[in-house]
Amino acid sequence: MMQFTHAAVTAPPLHPNGAHGLGLGLFLDVGAPRARPWPAGGFASTPPPLPTSSKISLGNLNSAGCMEQLLVHCANAIEANDATLTQQILWVLNNIAPADGDSNQRLTAAFLCALVTRASRTGACKAVTAAVAAAVESAALHVHRFTAVELASFVDLTPWHRFGYMAANAAILDAVEGFPVVHVVDLSTTHCMQIPTLIDMLASRAEGPPILRVTVADVASCSSAPPPVLDMSYDELGAKLVNFARSRNVSMDFRVVPTSPADAFSSLVDQLRVQQLVLDGTEALVFNCHMLLHTVPDETAGSVSLAQSVSLRTMLLKSLRSLEPALVVVAEEDADFTAGDVVGRLRAAFNFMWIPYDAVDTFLPKGSEQRRWYEAEVGWKVENVLAQEGVDRVERQEDRTRWGQRMRGAGFRPVAFGEEAAGEVRTMLNEHAAGWGMKREDDDLMLTWKGHNVVFASAWAPS
């Protein structure tokens, strides 16, 4: 349990009128005589006839495979600016995927809303999307702003983040053994929720606790900063962490550097280079990369001009290597959302994002506030994958194999996780639903849900 945690603070509902998601789902079984029209009367209760040349052969409309196929056809129709076909498919999807239905229906509803958002932003099928644009705007995903207490409790609900925390902390503890000063550069999306446990581990170190320096990459000012969102300043958070460290007899320095993944965290890297000029070799530098590396633009988003064309991801990893860190820990989702076309991303995301919708049924009751917060964050990710382009599309995950290739290419070698670290992760997983598991893949650890890869953790040292 995170050290910030005490009784959870009650927050107001995300949707005061009681609606879930974006309010685009209808409560209709396919084939039933009743239907609810789209907002503002945009669609009639029966769809326009589908042109014979565009008819789609589908099986059971309530199956995940059929819903994916419908979404693909809808995306293709939107990209082709085919208003008639778009209207027909949207009508079907709207009727079979209520936003408060089962996991497949909620997943499909999130993708439906993302496609409507994409169409409204790109101007495709204006006659169709204008009818629902108001509903999308008025009920746009309101990602919850967490207090530190709420966020600590929230990330403890599932191994999605805890897995990476535990694996990384164990690897860090091994890498900094014997160093009197430990400098952790936190490149993460969860606002230092991993740090209290690391402080506890360092405090109980056999040779005594080191001086701990924590530098945080603050990306909150970026236009597409990913959730979760913290409802307090990093100065306040840092003060809490310093006080907690003091209570554990750990001397701690906390610094914040405003930076952006859009330029490969260049301001952060520059500051670290300046600091290295005065180091005396007693400090162990560690980069803790937790779910943030994928927000750095990949090759599909363009490149920067150096001696030759180099991607921002390559530039970042080579910059980290030049700083001679003791360790770089990477925890990322084992997915690939980098396809240049929206249909390719839709298929990849649909076949990965079912996992959080399926898993949430095991740990959060339907209608609870925390479940609304959780699914709003998942919906934000879906919308970013499908509806955004350019630097605003920050959900550009790559799989474990590709990140491994990048790390080796930048001059790193893998560091295997010890059996003690793996055992601690297994113990943590026993606190959660039976569907969660862990396996080894080469030198890495992999979190699984019902046998499907979810999040990997890998550790790297300069080669």
Image: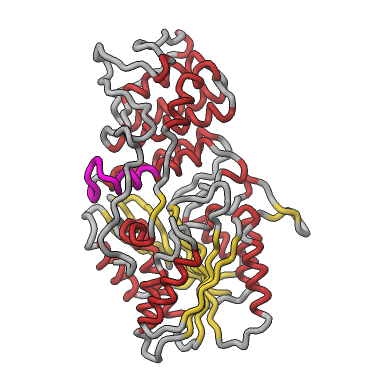
117 lies left or right of 34: right
Give the image's coloring scheme.
secondary structure
Q: Position of residue 97 (x, y in %)?
A: 32, 28
Q: Position of residue 151 (x, y in %)?
A: 36, 58
Q: In the displayed structure, would residue 219 be above or below residue 463?
A: above
190 lies left or right of 405: left
185 lies left or right of 67: right
Q: Position of residue 424 (x, y in %)?
A: 29, 71
Task: Name the one closer to the observer, 373 or 146.
Answer: 146
Q: In the displayed structure, would residue 170 be above or below residue 358?
A: below
Q: In the displayed structure, would residue 436 be above or below residue 320?
A: above
295 lies left or right of 318: left
Q: Is residue 14 visible?
A: yes
Task: Name the one closer to the observer, 361 or 349.
Answer: 361
Q: Residue furthest bottom?
A: 207
| Residue at 43% in and 26% down | 135
Q: Position of residue 366 (x, y in %)?
A: 23, 41
Q: Is residue 462 magenta?
A: no
Q: In the displayed structure, would residue 414 be above or below residue 282?
A: above
Q: Residue furthest right?
A: 307
The residue range painted magenta reads 362-376
